[in-house]
């Protein structure tokens, strides 16, 4: 509830500020978190009886919105809010194990748009605070560990570099394909191993580095009054 109130408040502030540009995008997102991979690999190795191995958490979807403030400078400032979802599922006899991973990022954005020889190209540098929630379901029910529903919350910081090319649709609206790469040097999530493998500190650290890549489409509305 607190997160919802905070997001609604942020959207209210955005709505009352004059913007140079509003952007919304969707993308495929690939994630590599080495410590989480180790926990899943240990889960598979220690359960020789399962034939359907647990896939690594690597494939997901991302959606984000950005608000770029009015400025006469070449490099403009803005705010970015993004959500990512990843899922890993294994299906065995009498055992369907599903891991659901959610990320929420709130960040500061620097936007540069070429107006000369490379007109149409743009880049965004986003520095954000990132949080996560990992949840496990077994046979369609939340997994219980230590007398409570299994979950792992995490927090860290992220830097993301995005590049795209804008194609005009009509008037002030544009569509652009883009690619992006992101890096989180330190992401603290002490209960992730316990959620995945029911162990703690045995096979992985309570933190991990995270590397992400994205490919997607962005919808732009420019020169909002």
Image (cartoon, rainbow, N blue to C red):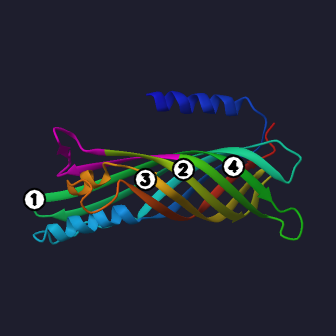
As measured in the structure, the alpha-carbon distance from the residue carrying label 3 to the one carrying label 1 is 26 Å
Name above or below for residue 142 compared with residue 85: above
Residue 119, percent from left and from top: 84, 66
Position of 74 compared to 61: left or right?
right
Mark 2: few, some, or many residues within 10 Å (few <14, many ≥20)? some
Mark 3: few, some, or many residues within 10 Å (few <14, many ≥20)? some
Mark 4: few, some, or many residues within 10 Å (few <14, many ≥20)? many
- Name the residue rendered at 20%, 49% in the picture: 140
Closer to the camera in the image, 210 or 49: 210
Look at the image and give the residue range highlighted in magenta.
Answer: 130-151
Task: Residue 129: say if magenta.
Answer: no
Which residue is denoted by mark 2 in the rendering? 157
Q: Quadrant of residue 176?
A: bottom right
Say what secondary structure mark 4 lies in.
strand
Per the rendering, the mark at residue 109 is 4
Name above or below for residue 63 compared with residue 165: above
| Res. 153 in view | yes
As measured in the structure, the alpha-carbon distance from the residue carrying label 3 to the one carrying label 2 is 17 Å
As measured in the structure, the alpha-carbon distance from the residue carrying label 4 to the one carrying label 3 is 22 Å
Say what secondary structure mark 3 lies in.
strand
- Name the residue rendered at 18%, 43% in the picture: 144
Contact between marks 3 and 1 (CB within 8 A): the answer is: no
């Amino acid at each position: 509830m607190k997160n919802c109130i905070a997001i609604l408040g942020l959207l209210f502030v955005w709505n009352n500020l004059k913007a140079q540009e509003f952007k919304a995008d969707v993308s495929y997102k690939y994630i590599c978190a080495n410590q989480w991979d180790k926990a899943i690999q240990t889960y598979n190795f220690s359960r020789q009886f399962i034939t359907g191995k647990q896939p690594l958490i690597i494939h997901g979807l991302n959606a984000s919105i950005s608000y770029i403030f009015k400025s006469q400078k070449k490099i403009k400032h803005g705010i970015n809010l993004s959500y990512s979802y990843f899922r890993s599922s294994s299906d065995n006899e009498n055992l369907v194990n599903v891991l659901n991973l959610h990320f929420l990022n709130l960040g500061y954005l620097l936007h540069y748009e070429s107006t000369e020889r490379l007109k149409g190209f743009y880049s965004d540098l986003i520095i954000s605070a990132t949080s996560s929630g990992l949840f496990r379901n077994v046979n369609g029910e939340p997994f219980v560990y230590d007398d409570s529903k299994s979950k792992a919350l995490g927090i860290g910081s992220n830097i993301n570099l995005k590049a795209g090319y804008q194609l005009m649709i009509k008037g002030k609206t544009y569509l652009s394909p883009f690619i992006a790469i992101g890096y989180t040097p330190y992401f603290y999530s002490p209960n992730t191993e316990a959620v995945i493998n029911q162990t703690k500190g045995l096979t992985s650290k309570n933190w991990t580095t995270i590397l992400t890549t994205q490919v997607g489409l962005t919808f732009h509305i420019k020169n909002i009054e």
